């Protein structure tokens, strides 16, 4: 029973630790990496609060050190998916009727556990499992995940406060019910924070969830699940399973209680999900909520007035941090002829100093790409340039080696064709393509930027001319859901730059904002009349 309204104030973003040489945090993180490397973790599924260990065992190796065994997980079969759904539905009534302050405090406790006791273990798991350097792990699996949990609690309490007007004699109120059924959360490999946000955002609204992470993120996902359990998440509210992607979909979309999908991943997978859900639409009790953030082909457009050094650094960081495996990564750049030589020279000088190697050596800026499939797909683009007849050439990097881990040098392609394949298609790796345009034609080039790819996720413009900035911002209004002025197109912060794109990049429901939380609620409007009329006639009918 609620005898008070409990509000959760707007939090501050979690401060980013810097892991500088000799720092306390660096020592603690190195210790956590060594501890995890010394273990072979036996990772269970979590169904109905039980650790489930059966089914086919699959090994987990760090992408940068294939010979090392980190642990194994158990691949889920159809039976496990059914059990996860049943367990979620069994937990639904108790969870949906748990008071908001008690639900909220579980997620706030998880955020505090992450910020303190488990910060280094969580970051170490992300470094080892997904090949992130210490800084990239810190901004993802510590800060962004902590922010998602704390800000989302605040956003939900803001939503609950939203109540309709009431005229004299009546009381109107709005209840924000969870959806009637279960939510499927399908999460990508590249951000531990996204893995954690997609199941917890619906769960804190009172929903029950089946969570299927990418196989290459199971190692860190399981650490987050341990934290949720320690924080007191009741059995069955989030069920973590590891089935093949297509199979989890087939079982879930055929279920009458399927109430929604919270997805982040590639555009092709999301479109196939949407089609399957559409084909099954008559089966469901309610129209499922479909929320998906997907691929990108993110641009950097430098205006002739740009500051060359700022463009070069925006490209170096924007394209190559975490090996370019961010949906937001800069992957096509348009630079003006008046600045082209200076930008390229500065950019190449920076990229050539980027050290590449395993995550245990903190001086490495570049680590490995996630797996063999990604390695093969990315290197195909590099090979295509090497054998192209002049439309494109490699001006930096271009070497790769998968003998010990999946290493690809940060690679810059220069092309004279603005529609060359690597200017249009998502590569999702450390590959940037640059096109130099005639500086006087900058206005016409904006149409090329807008129409070159089907995506509209992130994009940056660089300029020191305020009139040009306003013109470009208007002209590119539909080209990116996250638009940056004089900055790289990556690194959105929860509560500050709500994240998501439109067109083929997703439903733009903005992770890390109140907009996303609305998707997991089904409002009920209640009108109560104090003195109901007792005669059907209107006043003007009275004699
Ligand atoms: N817009 C964003 O916010 C955002 C954020 C991160 C990643 N991404 C995108 O994600 C992609 C990279 O991540 P990824 O390689 O993990 O993506 P992916 O699409 O290969 O996989 C994402 C998830 O979907 C599952 N899956 C695969 N096939 C499936 C199917 N047929 N049915 C159901 N589930 C299926 C995977 O196992 C995984 O859990 C890139 O395209 C990137 O742009 C987008
Ligand atoms: N939100 C992240 C990208 C997430 C996708 O991979 C960023 O802004 O760089």
Image: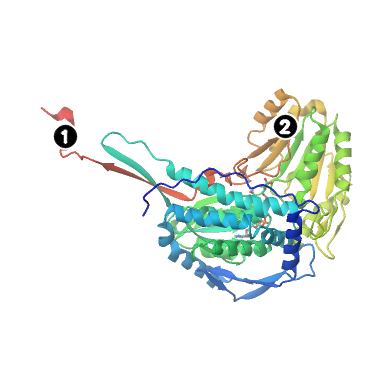
In the displayed structure, does residue 320 sit left or right of residue 398?
Answer: left
Using a 10 Å C-alpha cutoff, classify the residue at mark 2 as few (fewer than 14 neighbours), some (14 to 19) or many (20 or more): some
The circle drawn on residue 537 is: 1
**Which residue is at 19% across, 38% downward?**
533
Q: Specify the quarter for ligand 1.
A: bottom right
* Residue 48 place in picture, x, y as percent: 50, 69
> Which class describes the residues within 10 Å of circle 1: few (<14), some (14-19), or many (20+)?
few
Q: Residue furthest top?
A: 467
Please tell me whether mark 2 or mark 1 is closer to you in this view. Answer: 1
Relative to 375, say whether 344 is above or below: above
Please, what secondary structure does the residue beneath circle 1 have?
A: loop
The front one of 150 and 445 is 150
Residue topped by disc 2:
446
Q: Quadrant of the N terminus?
A: bottom left
The part of the image, by quadrant, that contains residue 439 is top right
Residue 381, x across and y down, in percent: 80, 52
> In the rendered image of this protein, does residue 320 appear above or below residue 367?
above
Q: Earlier in the sequence, mark 2 or mark 1?
A: 2
Can you tell me whether the CB of the residue at mark 1 lies under 8 Å from the nearest atom of ligand 1?
no
Q: Residue at x 65, y 56 (%)?
A: 192
Question: Is there any visible trace of residue 272 in the rendered image?
Answer: no
Horizontal placement of 72 versus 240: left or right?
right
Q: Which mark is residue 271?
A: none
Report which quarter residue 141 is drawn in.
Answer: bottom right
């Amino acid at each position: 029973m609620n005898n008070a309204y409990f509000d959760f104030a707007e939090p501050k973003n979690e401060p980013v630790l810097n892991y500088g040489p000799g720092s306390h945090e660096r020592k603690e993180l190195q210790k956590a990496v060594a501890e995890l490397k010394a273990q072979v973790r036996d990772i269970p599924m979590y169904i109905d609060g039980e650790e489930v260990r059966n089914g086919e065992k699959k090994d987990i190796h760090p992408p940068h050190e294939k010979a090392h065994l980190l642990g194994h997980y158990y691949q889920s079969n159809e039976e496990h998916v059914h059990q996860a759904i049943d367990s979620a539905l069994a937990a639904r009534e108790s969870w949906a009727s748990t008071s908001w302050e008690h639900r909220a405090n579980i997620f706030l406790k998880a955020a505090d556990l992450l910020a303190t006791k488990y910060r280094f273990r969580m970051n170490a798991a992300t470094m080892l499992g997904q090949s992130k350097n210490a800084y990239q792990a810190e901004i993802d699996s510590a800060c962004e995940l902590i922010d998602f949990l704390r800000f989302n609690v605040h956003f939900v309490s803001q939503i609950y406060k939203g109540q309709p007007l009431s005229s004299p004699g009546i009381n109107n109120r709005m209840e924000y019910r969870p959806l009637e059924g279960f939510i499927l959360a399908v999460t990508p490999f590249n951000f531990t924070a996204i893995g954690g946000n997609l199941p917890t955002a619906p769960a804190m609204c009172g929903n029950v969830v089946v969570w299927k992470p990418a196989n290459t993120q199971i190692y860190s996902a399981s650490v987050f699940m341990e934290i949720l359990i320690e924080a007191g998440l009741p059995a069955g509210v989030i069920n973590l399973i590891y089935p093949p992607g297509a199979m989890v979909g087939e079982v879930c979309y055929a279920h009458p209680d399927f109430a929604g999908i919270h997805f982040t991943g590639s555009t092709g997978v999301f479109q196939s999900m949407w089609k399957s859900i559409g084909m099954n639409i008559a089966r469901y009790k309610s129209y499922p909520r479909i929320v998906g953030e997907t691929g990108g082909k993110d641009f950097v457009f430098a205006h002739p007035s740009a500051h060359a050094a700022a463009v070069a650094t925006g490209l170096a960081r924007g394209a190559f941090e975490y090996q370019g495996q961010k949906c937001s990564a800069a992957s096509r750049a348009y630079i003006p002829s008046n600045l082209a030589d200076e930008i390229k020279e500065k950019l190449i000088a920076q990229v050539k100093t980027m050290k590449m190697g395993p995550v245990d050596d903190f001086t490495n800026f570049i680590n490995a790409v996630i797996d063999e499939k990604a390695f093969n797909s990315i290197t195909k683009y590099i090979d295509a340039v090497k054998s192209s007849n002049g439309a494109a050439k490699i001006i930096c990097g271009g070497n790769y080696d998968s003998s010990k881990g999946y290493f690809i040098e940060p690679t810059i392609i220069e092309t004279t064709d603005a529609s060359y394949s690597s200017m249009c298609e998502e590569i999702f790796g450390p590959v940037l393509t640059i096109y130099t345009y005639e500086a006087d034609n900058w206005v016409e080039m904006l149409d090329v930027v807008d129409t070159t790819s089907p995506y509209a996720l992130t994009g940056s413009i660089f300029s020191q001319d305020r009139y040009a900035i306003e013109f470009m911002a208007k002209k590119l209004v539909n080209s990116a859901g996250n638009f940056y002025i004089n900055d790289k197109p990556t690194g959105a912060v929860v509560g500050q730059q709500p994240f998501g794109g439109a067109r083929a990049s997703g439903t733009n429901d903005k992770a890390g904002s109140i907009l996303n939380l609305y998707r997991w609620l089904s409002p009920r409007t209640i009108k109560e009349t104090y003195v109901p009329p007792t005669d059907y006639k209107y006043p003007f009918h009275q004699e």
